[in-house]
Amino acid sequence: MNSVELTVNKRVVQKAVEPRTSLADMMRDTLDLTGTHLGCEHGVCGACTILVDGVPTRSCITYAVACDGADVTTIEGLDDDEIAGELRAAFTREHALQCGYCTPGMLVSARDLVKRLPDADEKKIRIGMSGNLCRCTGYVGIVRAVQSVIAERRARDIAPEPDGGRKVLGPAGAGHNVCVSAQKSAVAKSATRDATEVIAPLEIPDFTPSTTLDQQFTVAHPSATVFALFDDIAAVASCLPGATLVGTPRPERVEGAIRVKIGPISANFNGAARVERDEANLSGRILGVGNDQRSRSTTQGEIRYRLVPLDDGASTQVELTIGYSLTGMLAQVGRSGLVRDLAARLVAEFAGNLDRRLSGDATSAPPAAADLNGVSLILGLLRERATRFVRRFAGRGGSA
Amino acid sequence: MKPAPFAYERPRDIASALAVMASTDGVVKIMAGGQSLGPMLNLRLVAPDTIVDITGLAELKHVEVTGDELVIGACVTHADIEDGRIPDVTRGAMQRVASAIAYRAVRNRGTVGGSLSHADPSADWVSTFAALGATLSLRSAKGARRVAMKDFMLGALESVLQPREMLEAVRVPVMSASARWGYVKSCRKTGEFAHAIGAVLIDPEAGKARVVIGAVEAAPIIVESAEELFGGRITSDFGTKFDARVADNLLSKAGMSDAADRHIHVTVLRRAVAEAAA
């Protein structure tokens, strides 16, 4: 727990909060200021918008500890505010709310627009309010309400403040209690989190992949040699960046893990696979299922391969079809473009490793994927950005 | 939707921030506004052991014009640029870009350095600073180095930033009086991450053009000498010389196989060129 001091609605408060406590949770759970609403909790819907150092911020993605010493105003603190009063009257008049869930955030954002916009331009108001979602009104009433307040105030010769009153540089809320440094807080977590007993799934079911990608590459070795290598499960796994095996692999059951990394996001899929081979057609299939405990996501994947002899058998074209399905938390950030990019990079790496392996260069076994910057992993699973959530949620909201 | 527990450090200056990062075990993440990191923490896509909050460091909010470049501290916010709280050497180009990033509440905390370090291919500054020819100052306990923005991005969320290294400042060259700027992005919803970005800096008097095709789900496509996109030569009528086929080829070569995706990017780039020519 860290001690955080804030001025909330003109009252100084000091509370002990965890570093992970958002400003919104501190307002609601610690100070009972439940007028601050939480919608998406990742900065998209705007319901949690409150004033920090006088300007709107997202209190769901701003941590209380990072605002130590700041001045905070929630909707409760705007009761006697002149602009907020005018906006409340206008919202009532224009039917700018129905259920009211978005209204606290709407009023905070609208108040900021009223201060900053030079005139009641509808387009600018719509753009300015686009970070606050309302599922009831269709926005027409909200826009009219904001327009009317701006128009009335400008008619009363109240000049706009283009900077919304902010005069200093840097993130709102930051830089007050600078000298409170090195707030060591003993967090006992990773030990328990990482040591969780990992159990590979028992079943390796057949499935229809939701996404498939085709890749191919050529290695300068005869098909028989390549086919033999594909039979050596440990060798194949060692060519696959991020893959590790547990126990003795058998064709009907291989247990292991694959670590996938993109930027700061990483996942460790523990699972099992089975291997099928068709000697007559120099083809085969690796079918697997895995779980990432931390994100509670599950993936199923298959790699189908087919070897085509080239150059009178001197080299081999390896044709891969990679298919996967993903469920759970990580599935919500799936996007095919990045996955394809990942798969291409993965396969390039896989091909290079395979080629080196076939050339007898067993010493150049690839390092663990965790050490490979930019090497993301197989089946494309991850390779995603949390920020895409934003788009997805917004998109879904738009079609709701 | 609550982050996994993390330890929190708020150092007093850059030196102690670097020392904290060097001496702390486990995964350390810098937070410089947290408008990208916050959602990832809440969704538990990222679960660092320690967060180092650099938003209080005065050194990172320092801005100055030295010689022919503007040096912007990493913790300057999008709103600081939008509102003109820092000097401008780009004749309003940065101000216009800043004003269209996400939403005002995000711009009030989101920083230039945080956005670049996050290395989202769809982020506005990633394409903008590449087109403006900016350079980044990076610092770690081992020392300082400079990297051109065009060499910074390696892929989606991947940059040349090393573990325990931080972005200290962005150095933006003064835009020449004859240079023309165009910046267009395609978003289906206002404020969301762009699906396509076109950024162009064209100087017909110098016969030079730099073109960036961004939001390609990987490092942006940067054409440092973009004569080929304008029929081989940059002239004052470059607006009528834009060759969409060359742009389409660039995208194909970069691996964008979907014709509709290429069409969107080419169209956005054409609009950016038109804006520069207007």
Image: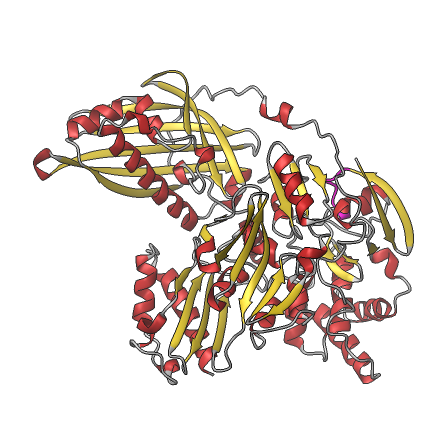
Q: Position of residue A42 (x, y in %)?
A: 64, 49
Q: Left or right of A33: which side holds B34?
A: left
Percent of width and height locating residue A272? 42, 23
Q: Please name the predominant secondary structure of the magenta segment in the image.
A: loop
Q: Quadrant of residue A29?
A: top right
Specify the farthest residue to the top.
A248
Q: Which residues are the magenta region?
A: A18-23
Query: Considering only vertical position in the picture, is B141 above or below A117?
Result: above
A21 part of magenta stretch: yes
Residue lying at the far left of the rendered structure: A312
User: Considering depth in this image, is A78 or B16 the residue closer to the camera?
Assistant: B16
Residue at horizontal 50 percent and vertical 58 percent from the top: B122
At which x and y percent is residue B204? 40, 81
- Residue A162 vs residue B64, the one in the foreground: B64
Taking depth in this image into account, of A98 and A384 the one nearest to the observer is A384
Tell whether B126 sits left or right of A242: right
Q: Residue at position x 50%, y 31% from top?
A: A268
Can residue A134 be seen here? The reply is no
Report whether A241 appears left or right of B117.
left
Image quadrant for the C terminus of chain A? bottom right
Instruction: Identify the image quadrant of the N terminus of chain A.
Output: top right
User: Which residue lies at the image location 58% right of the left edge and 65% below the top edge?
Assistant: B190
Q: How many marks?
A: 0
Say above or below: A389 vs B250: above
* Residue A6 visible to the viewer: yes
Q: Residue placed at 74% from the left, 73% from the top?
A: A116
Q: How is the image coloured?
A: secondary structure
Residue A5 belongs to the span the image colors magenta = no
Q: Position of residue A40 (x, y in %)?
A: 66, 49
State which quadrant residue A71 falls in.
bottom right
